[in-house]
Image (spheres, rainbow, N blue to C red):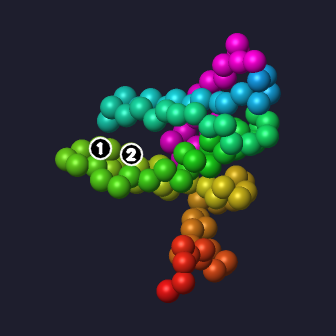
């Protein structure tokens, strides 16, 4: 299990994987109302703890671009955003450390 802005998320590991500790971790989170399922795999990180942290970071950075005509979906993401933590330090508050609010200069794709 890993904690995210969406609550507790179940992690899955293939037990029959020949790579052992190098195996990827899967994750799944289901929400009943609105009907939503977030799932995927992560192979990032050198061990299970690093992979778990990477999955938590990915889930905390997940944003809703459009909800169509689903106000409950927009509300779910808005409430989850209030619980978001920084990926750098999970113990920090829910204050965002993105390129607007962060103290570092933003990393741009190229010269202006």
Quadrant holding the N terminus: top right
The answer to which image quadrant residue 37 occupies is: top left
The residue where tag 2 is placed is 76
Q: Is residue 68 above or below residue 106?
A: above
| Residue displayed at 67% across by 30% down | 24
| Residue displayed at 68% across by 42% down | 44
- Residue 4 forms part of the magenta stretch: yes
Label 1 crowding class (10 Å Cα cut-off): few <14, some 14-19, many 20+?
Answer: few
The answer to which image quadrant residue 23 occupies is: top right
The residue where tag 1 is placed is 72
| Residue displayed at 37% across by 29% down | 32
Point out residue 8 in the picture as x, y percentages from the top left corner. 58, 34
From where the camera sits, is residue 9 visible? Answer: no
| Residue displayed at 44% across by 53% down | 63
Point out residue 9 in the picture as x, y percentages from the top left corner. 57, 33
Q: Is residue 30 above or below residue 15?
A: below
Q: Which residues are magenta?
A: 1-18
Tell me if label 2 and label 1 are in contact, CB under 8 Å.
yes
Name the side, left or right, on which 44 lies relative to 101: right
The answer to which image quadrant residue 86 occupies is: bottom right
- Residue 88 forms part of the magenta stretch: no
């Amino acid at each position: 299990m890993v904690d995210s802005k969406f609550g507790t998320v179940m992690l899955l590991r293939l037990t029959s994987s020949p790579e052992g500790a190098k195996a990827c971790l899967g994750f799944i989170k289901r929400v009943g109302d609105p009907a939503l399922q977030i799932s995927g795999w992560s192979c990032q990180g050198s061990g299970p703890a690093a992979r778990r942290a990477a999955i938590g970071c990915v889930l905390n950075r997940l944003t809703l671009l459009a909800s169509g005509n689903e106000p409950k979906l927009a509300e779910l993401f808005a409430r989850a955003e209030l619980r978001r933590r920084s990926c750098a330090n999970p113990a920090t508050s829910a204050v965002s450390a993105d390129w607007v609010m962060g103290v570092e200069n933003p990393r741009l794709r190229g010269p202006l």
